[in-house]
Image (cartoon, rainbow, N blue to C red):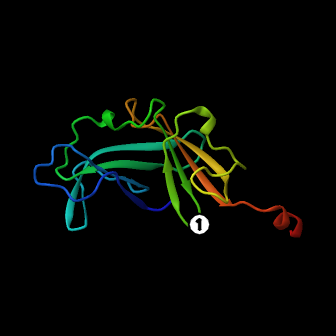
Amino acid sequence: MPLGIKLPLRPRETSSAYRDEGHSLEIGLIPLQIGDVRRWDEQAWHVAYVETYSPSTETNNCFSVAILTPDGTLANPLALHVGNQRLLHLYFSSEDFALTWPEPDECLPHVGNEALPWEGWQVERRQEFMSDREDALYDRVLICWCIPIQTAADATAA
């Protein structure tokens, strides 16, 4: 997983009258601390909230999700939930990454199935992560490592 993925969840241009109108999300292996400052687009963003996610199976992999705001405050992190299941999918390939917040269970990614955000890619491996907090933004985070779908011609040539 990349060391830091910054995901603006609204335009990063903010007015001086910012009142918890939006935020930016950063996912990384190196956990940030509340109060840390990141700078981009000539704007200072302050870490307002941090959660750590650990695997549901025994591995050493873990990552943190930090929410950054221009003034370092976040009135209600639980208001950031997307959907009722609070499920986040992260898809990684050799070319890109994508996030999805699917609702129905039938949208869960499975090994060997096509990666929903991309045509021509399939899930090769899937890992499930759980938060260290009871009031987490997400109940589960599924990370899917994707490879190109092999066509029938590719499979017979091998």
| Element marked by disc 1 | loop
Q: Which residue is identified by label 1?
A: 94
Residue with the most extreme front position: 119
Residue drawn at (38%, 36%) of the image: 81
Outermost left residue: 16
The extreme bottom residue here reads 157
Residue positioned 57% across, 38% down in the render:
56
Give the total number of marks visible in the rendering: 1
Along the line of sight, which residue is nearer the eye, 71 or 150? Answer: 150
Residue 62 lies, in percent from the top left, at: 49, 49
Left or right of residue 139, residue 37 in this image = left
Place residue 52 in its image quadrant.
top left
**Position above or below: 30 against 73:** below
Q: From this viewpoint, which residue is outermost toward the right? A: 156
Question: Residue 79's spot in the image, x, y percent?
Answer: 31, 34
Amino acid type, mark 1: Ser
Residue at the (79%, 62%) spot, across then down: 151
Give the residue drawn at x 33%, y 33%.
Answer: 78
User: In the shown orientation, is residue 44 left or right of residue 145?
Assistant: left
Q: Is residue 34 above or below residue 12?
A: above
For label 1, count other residues whose C-alpha is less than 10 Å away and answer few (under 14), some (14-19) or many (20+): few
